[in-house]
Amino acid sequence: MNIHEYQAKELLAKFGAPVPAGFAALSVEEAVEAARKLPGPLYVVKAQIHAGGRGKGKFKELGPDARGGVRLARTLDEVEAAAKDMLGNTLVTVQTGPAGKQVNRLYVTDGVDIDKEFYLALLVDRGTGRIAIVASTEGGMDIETVAHDTPEKIHTITIDPATGIQPHHGRRVAAALGLSGDLAKQAAQVTGALYKAFLGTDASQIEINPLAIAGGKIQVLDAKVGFDGNALFRHPDLMELRDETEEDPAELEASKYDLAYIKLDGDIGCMVNGAGLAMATMDIIKLNGMFPANFLDVGGGASKEKVTAAFKIILSDPAVKGILVNIFGGIMRCDIIAEGIVAAAKEVNLSVPLVVRLEGTNVQQGKDILASSGLAIVPADDLGDAAKKIVAEVKALG
């Protein structure tokens, strides 16, 4: 689960991170009132969406010459003008894709004179099973570009979970950022605060870009925070920060049924049990010349209702021209899957080709249910056969 920048900053401040004053706003009037609460004379008005690249983004409604989703303002009138430009309009960035995201809230912060920008992040290093600190002197830039062009400017420091963060970690971060004296001490303090926040919230990522020196002080000027969804049951306070308007409607619906669903850009819908099998299914569709419309893992113990919901979610995508169901029944029984497929197909008046490959527990009962359903379901013997058949069926439609 991701949260907005203003929520991330409020959260990190509770753990001791140095964050400039700022206020969220849901209307133009609230944005102006937020600016009045700040000392000024410089303000920053930021669009709040779950995507990076806001400063370089463009609003669909404002034309190619309009400024992006992060703007400096020197008067209340300029704050008002920026808020009017942003609220309710669609911001397109490198991370939103061409569809963009509608801006429904803003963050008005106190402007600062920046002397130097850095990059600092904490994330889970799955290779070592530890929390890793990533630091770079190249702040304010796309870290992917830095990693590609100048990888020597990125420093990674892992923390042993048995000891937790130690003073030497802070000193190493300061050295990586080229800081000394009091600034080095501040960098160590910020690192410690971020580590406490990471553990305390079961975060999956805390990214500060930029971490800046302004007026002799290190400050967190932007923050991106994501949490481990499997640990959110321990944090009802964090669940309250969820902004469902920022999530794909189909993915949001899938989460209600504990389905692992991710929308993709293809035209063949997939329903599979098991993440590995789902990936293999997507790959073999591509090998046969077409592209998957989604990743969908129904899990190992799905009910008839869960399978029906999965079917409806796949069909809610207008790009889907055919569906491939690939089930290996271990814990999951093939007859339960078959009942769900039949129920869903009848309920939604299925109008696209459907190929089903079943194998495993109660496989014959499952095949009998499909065969006697009266529906135009194409059976397949194995995964290769299933992929060839669904691609042929979709291509036959033109």
Image: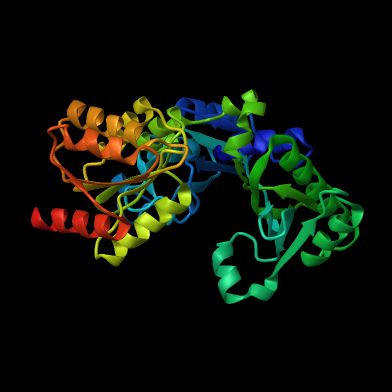
Residue 398 makes an appearance in the image:
no
* Residue at the spot 55% in from the left edge and 26% down from the top edge: 33
Q: Quadrant of the N terminus?
A: top right
Relative side of 131 to 52, left or right? right
Q: Quadrant of residue 136?
A: bottom right
The percent coordinates of residue 222 (x first, y second) are 62, 47
Q: Quadrant of the C terminus?
A: bottom left
Viewer-proximal residue among 327 and 137: 327
Viewer-proximal residue among 15 and 323: 323
* Residue at the spot 49% in from the left edge and 43% down from the top edge: 50
* Residue at the spot 17% in from the left edge and 32% down from the top edge: 373
Relative side of 384 to 173, left or right? left
Q: Quadrant of residue 129?
A: bottom right
Q: Total marks drawn? A: 0
Viewer-proximal residue among 242 and 180: 242
Residue 82 makes an appearance in the image:
yes
Q: Quadrant of residue 6?
A: top right
The percent coordinates of residue 260 (x first, y second) are 45, 40
Relative side of 345 to 180, left or right? left
Relative side of 84 to 220, left or right? left
